[in-house]
Image (spheres, grey):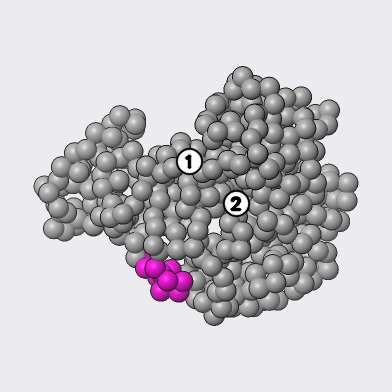
Amino acid sequence: MTASGLLVGVDVGTTRIKALAVDAAGKERARAERPTPWRRENGRTEADPERVAELAAVVAAEAAAASGEPRVLGIGVTGMAETGVLADGADRPLAPAIAWHDPRGDAETIHRELGTDLFQRTTGMRAGPLPSLAKLLWLRREHPETAAAARFYSVGEWVVRRLGGEPVAELSLASRTGLLDLGTARPWPAAAELLGGRVLLPDPIPAGTPAGRAGGAHVPAVLHGAVLTVAGHDDQVAAYGVGAAEDGALFDSLGTAEALVRTVRPPLPPERVGALTAQGVTVGWHVAAGHLCVMAGLPTGLTLGRIATMLGATTAEARAELGRLALAEAGGHPTLRLVNPREEHFGLAGITDDVTPARLWRAAVDGLAEHAAALLGRIDAQVGPCRRVVAAGGWLRDPAVLAAKRRHFPGMRTAGVSEPGAYGAALLAAKAAGVPLRPAADG
């Protein structure tokens, strides 16, 4: 089957909402983006669900219109996990969409009523404020009116619904909510009981499943008639977009956060799931049908950005030069090292009189690469070693970062697309629309 027309991938990310228009030959034709419309106050981060959906429709329409191709065959929507929309029976939002990284969350009830180990072994999520369940419990406690909720949509599911699609739940996103039993791939009754017996998820469907067609008075006309699909969790969709979503593959995404995304063929026994979640590693169903995703996040890009600013390298050109100078350093400094890199803070130890900005940058880059490799080693101990590595992300433009990664992964390939998440969403839109579109080759 051949087709003329566009596949549009939308990526509702933490920083930006992006859209990529791809033709039926797999070539990028146009793109558009807007900042994600967060409201930030007193350490809290949230967004108006209707505004998020509106901007997603705007960027999708802009990318489609800029391509010069009049027909949109399919639209796939990927996005951040955990963030979502609590809606009533008429799909009216009952609360703002709370950011996944927002500290609000009632983890204490999860610990007390379900038990930490049972929750983690069952859901593949750590029992903290991150899973959607913790945020839903907080909302019920602080805003009793949300007890009338009939449905929880992950943000990608919400956008598809607002584009005129069906009210579906997608498996990889449902896996991040704390509402899903990994073993059955169905809503977990014990989690529903904590929410007053309300089952807020339908049985999930795989990424790339058709979920209706775009339409409605509020949807831009250029998108009307396109087959809609929920593409799933953004990091996994990016792995899918660069061809790193098969058993034994590792996708290393180096943005503000570094995501280590392993694709694993099930089963994974509950005790191994528990061992991984105890180390802050999550386990869930993958956008690649019939596979699990084992994933860890690290503050690599955030830490590098802070150090670069401290060193006065505040532009892309200055950071690239810093990377070139660091790469020219012959080996590491004998005492300088990065200490305890976390999202909240990090340390630098062993600073002596001969420490230059280039040497400090080299120590930071190498230390962060070693930290990621050590975490990956702990993952490998539970699921087996990775056999193929593909990397992507803006920090790979730093020659020192790229070299450090290649030292740990000699056979590593770099992705050949600039927006893997949006591109992967376009691929899954092609799947839903029945268009034979192949992933772009890696570099």
Q: Residue tagged by mark 2?
A: 233
Closer to us: 439 or 199 = 439
Look at label 2 and name its amino acid: His
Look at label 1 and name its amino acid: Ala
The secondary structure type at the circle numbered 2 is strand
Give coordinates of residue 405: x percent, y percent.
Answer: 31, 52
Count of numbered labels shown in the rendering: 2
- Nearest to the eye among marks 1 and 2: give it: 1
Residue occupying image coordinates x 59% and y 48%: 80
Give coordinates of residue 363: x percent, y percent.
Answer: 23, 52
Q: Residue tagged by mark 1?
A: 440
Tell me which segment is drawn in magenta: 375-385
Q: Around disc 1, counting alpha carbons within 10 Å, would you say few (fewer than 14), some (14 to 19), or many (20 or more)?
A: some
Tell me, for residue 155, which label it has, or none: none
Q: Is residue 258 above or below residue 54?
A: below
Q: Is residue 377 above or below residue 213?
A: below
